[in-house]
Each structure stands twice: as structure tokens, then as C-alpha cells.
Amino acid sequence: MSNIIYPTTNLKNTETLTIERGDGVYVYDDQGNRYLEGLAGLWCTSLGYNNRELIDAANEQMGQLSYSHMFGGKTHQVGIDLAAKVAEMVPVENAKVFFGNSGSDANDTHIKMLRYYFNAIGKPEKFKIISRDRSYHGITVASASLTGLPANHQHFDLPFDTLGILRTDAPHYYRGALPGESEADFVTRITNNLEQMILQEGPETIAAFIAEPITGASGVIVPPQGYYQRVQDILAKYDILFWADEVITGFGRTGKDFGCNTMGIDSPALMTLAKQLSSAYIPISASVVRGDIYEAMIEPSSQVGVFGHGYTYSGHPVGCAVALKTLEIYQRDNIFGKAAETGAYLQEGLSKLADHPLVGEVRGEGMIAAVEMVANKQTGEAFAGGAIGAFAQQACERHGLITRAVAGSSLALCPPLIATEQHIDEILESFGKALDDTLDHVTKQGLLTG
Ligand code: PLP
């Protein structure tokens, strides 16, 4: 056993697979077995592995300037260029960009900027943040507090009360609807709950509402029609900012350039980006804010003498160079347009699994999806714990496909955006076999209840 403390791992069951190298959409283990990376690593390797242009961009930047920081007004051209490119792409008005290293620290940065901003405009009491059940926003103390998944709170004494995190319903009709409730009634009920909570807490105390346009780690929840429209109406009514966490959904993942565009979210005030920003060749994240939020922070920073927030690696030149090249490739090669077509093919193929005796729900949009396995197809009764999800994930691996079990018994798919229809066929074939293996297993174990 090595000396590593493994992240997000059952510490009784570590070192299950050693990955040695990657090429295109495939990775290879230390035994020479090939796997199609059906989750793009952790929803991030959009351009796949061994992309020469990205490797060269990193090498060249390392040769030219391997490090320079951005404290005290220092800057470099590749950082300026990247910020300009991000600002041009995002649906945020007059966007300003703060660079970090991960989605988690980018969300922490947003929490701090929200406080800074509302203090600056004379509303210090407006600091609470509404986050949804079953959301995932990261794992640092503050971002894990935003996260709405119990496994990320238990034994860590999270969330921290002082952060003022409020929790509202997950927009998951399949799991959250009352018996006989229509989708439209579900939307009305959970958004009424949201409005009630805002009124109870006092709108003047609430800064922002954070949402992944389509969730990832919590099981790829695609909210029903009308949900985001109603949420935006409520937020506008009570002067609460929309904060889009696009760490997974940013850059072509959902069939459009951003999840906000896919889901009809107009002009969020804040946006969090990471993962596909650099196709995960190197860590870099971006906390994007609307121009007026930035403008309001200028005077107080001048009074203090400094905007007292920044990481050693904020705007790391190698990260910036790789991200800039990634965005150039996305646009030059029409990666988002092609991924939209491949994504439609993936969704269509997966929809055929809906009749499988083990499948409760198939959901997704573009190149992100999940298939939820259930103990009882008629009632939707879930399997207890996460053992069946873990079994199915391993069954996929035995058939040469890497997926990830999320939210108990859902298997997620999120292939690199460069995957072709042939790759999707391969994914569907392996996935189908793994589902059959899992059905065999649960039948022998007597775990089906219907
Ligand atoms: N936000 C979302 C929506 C995510 O999916 C993730 C990670 O999966 C994060 C934030 C945290 O990003 P990181 O793991 O880079 O800290």
C-alpha cells in the first residue's frame, strides 16, 4: 500500500486500478488493458489524451516563462489574452475574471467576492447563499458547505453555519415528485418552496442562488421545463444574484457552449469555470463576475491598499497558455457543434436502455448523461447504499469502459467531446453488457423487489 490518502475513496478499498497512459479517448492500465474514458476523467478531459497541440503549448510556455504571479499589479500577456477570451465567450455582462486552480477554490473566491461586493455597496447583511440539495460545488471548507451531498459533510462538521448557506429542493422530478404530481406541478411546488424560504429568511439577507445548470456528481439532474424561468423570475423579484456553477457544464458539454444557454439561464451575475477550461491538461479555474460587481470592489480595495485575495498560482502562465490553446481548438475545430451532434446520438442510444428491467431513469443532455438503476422498475424503489452502483461501475471496467457510479445507483457518462459516433457505439455496447451483468448479480442476490 502506498502513502497516498486517496480522495473521495472508501479508505478500506483503495488502489483498485492503476492507469498508466492515455491516447485520444482511451486510457491504458498497468496490465496493458484499454478502456474508453467514458467520464472524461472527472468530467474534464474534453480534448482527450496526448493532444500534441496542448502538450506543445505547455512546453513552449514553460520554456518562455514557467512562472510569474499576478500580485501587486504584475501581469503577463498570456493571462490577459485568456481573460479576454473567456470574457468574450461567457454570457456574463462585461465579464471580469479571477483565475484560480480548481473549481472548489473558484467557488470560494466567489463567496468572498460576494461578501466584498455587498459590503462595498452598503448591504453587509446580504451574504447568505441558496444552494440546492444534492448539489456539488467542491470540497474546500466553504465550497463543501455549498455542496448538498451528505457524504461530503459527515465527519467533517460541515456545513459551517457562519457561511449562511440555505438549502432548497433538488429539481429532480423522478426522485422528488409526490405521487401523481405532474412535472409542471412539481416545478410550481419546489419553486414556491424557494420563494417561501426567501421570504422567511428576508430577501435583504440573501446574496445569491448557486446552481449547476445540469448537475454532475449528484447524478446528472436535468431540471424540468420551466424550472429555471421560474427561479430567475423569483430571484429578480427579490434582487438575488444568479450564480452558475459551470465547472462541468461549461464549454460545449451540454450541447451548447454553456449550460446556461442550454437551460435558458440568461446572463448570470457570476459563473464558475474549471475542468474543460484547459481540457484538464493542467489545473486552472476562473471565477467570472459581472462588470458592475468588479467596479464596486475597486474603491474599498484602494482604501485597504489591496484586494486581499489571491493564490500563488492565480493566472499561472502555463495554465493560461494551455487554456488559451484549448479555447482556440474548441473554436477552430467546431468542437461544441460536433459534440452537440455526437451528444444527440449518445442520448438517443441511451434512451433505448429505458426498457431494461434494471433501469429506472435515463437522463442527460448533450455529452452528459446518467442511467439510474432501481430495485423496482414500477415503483422506482432505489437500491440501498452504493454497492450496486459500485458493482456496475466495475462491470463496465471489465467491458473496457470507465464510468462512475454517482448518487448511489446511477452510472454517469460524460465522454471526451472529441468522441465520435463509433466511440459512442462502443460505449453503448459495453454499457449494455455491464447492465446485463448487474441484472444477473442483483437477481442472484435477490435484490429486486418488483
Ligand atoms: N463545481 C462543480 C459543479 C463540480 O462538478 C466540481 C467538481 O467536480 C467542482 C465545483 C469542484 O471542482 P474541483 O474538483 O476542481 O475543485
Image: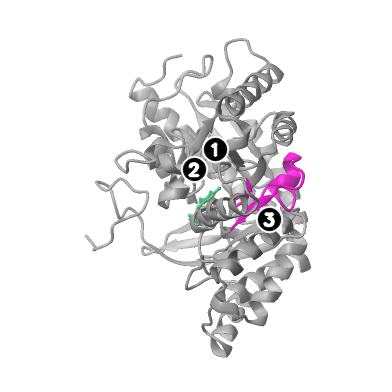
Give the vertical position of 12 relative to 32 (above or below): above
Residue that label 2 marks: 146
**Is residue 282 shown left or right of residue 352?**
left
Amino acid at the residue labelled 2:
Leu
Question: Residue 69, can we see it?
Answer: yes
**Is residue 329 shown left or right of residue 355?**
right
Mark 1, Cα crowd under 10 Å, few <14 / some 14-19 / many 20+, is many
Q: Which residues are magenta?
A: 244-273
Mark 3, Cα crowd under 10 Å, few <14 / some 14-19 / many 20+, is many
Q: Say whether disc 2 or disc 1 marks the residue closer to the N-terminus.
A: 1
Give the vertical position of 250 relative to 50 (above or below): above
Q: Say whether disc 3 or disc 2 marks the residue closer to the N-terminus.
A: 2
Out of 422 and 412, give the one closest to the viewer.
412
Outermost residue, left direction?
Answer: 1
Seen at 51% across and 68% down, the residue is 310
**Is residue 187 shown left or right of residue 10?**
right
**Label 2 near label 3: C-beta < 8 Å?**
no
- Of helix, strand and loop, which one carries label 1? strand
- Tag on residue 131? 1
- Of helix, strand and loop, which one carries label 3? helix
Question: Residue 159, can we see it?
Answer: no
Residue 239: x and y in percent read 70, 38
Residue 438 placement: quadrant: top left
- Tag on residue 293? 3
Seen at 52% across and 23% down, the residue is 357
